[in-house]
Image (cartoon, grey):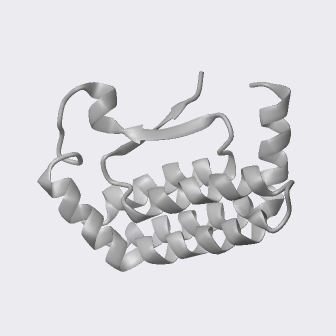
Amino acid sequence: MSLLRLLLNIIWLFTGGLVMGLAWWLVGLLCFISIIGIPFGRACFVIGELSLWPFGQTVIEREYLTGKQDIGTGNLGMVGNIIWFLLFGFWLGLGHLLLAIASFITIIGIPFGLQHLKLAQLSLTPIGQTIVAKA
């Protein structure tokens, strides 16, 4: 990891990354209450880790990465994303959006605001997505 990415990730923790990472993990714990929610909860912990350390990672559709459809990239994935959005996605997305707006107030905060927007988009429809390291 480059020194710049490390520095940006450390500053990120103080510009909302820590708060949103913990929010993702809290939602993950809530999802683990039911057996049906376990896949959602596991995804929350992965995205929570991304929320803590986003620079140097990106989100892509799993179908493009693997070249084939699976249960999360087909119709069941769409249904799962709708359920996710209604229960948790809207609120997590709103949190990232508000932190993005707060970050955009200063010129120095623009990279952090862009990361919050990336995470806000992911929080609306996380099923069928995967996180990969940037080259």
Q: Nearer the viewer, residue 104 or 123?
A: 104
Dividing the picture into quadrants, the one containing residue 117 is bottom right
Q: Quadrant of residue 19?
A: bottom right
User: Which residue corresponds to the image point at 54% horizontal and 38% vertical from the top-left?
Assistant: 58
Q: Nearer the viewer, residue 100 or 70?
A: 100
Q: Is residue 72 above or below residue 58?
A: below
Left or right for 16, reference 129: right
Q: Residue furthest top?
A: 135
Image-quadrant location for residue 22: bottom right
Whether 7 is drawn above or below 90: the answer is above
Left or right, residue 64 beside residue 13: left
Which residue: 39% across, 69% down?
A: 31
The correct choice, above or below, for 15 with respect to 135 in the image is below
User: Is residue 35 visible in the rendered structure shown here?
Assistant: no
Q: Position of residue 28 (x, y in %)?
A: 47, 64
Please tell me which residue is depicted at 77% across the width and 44% down the height of the picture. Answer: 9
The x and y percentages for residue 135 are 60, 21
**In the displayed structure, does residue 19 sit left or right of residue 109?**
left
In which quadrant is the N terminus drawn?
top right
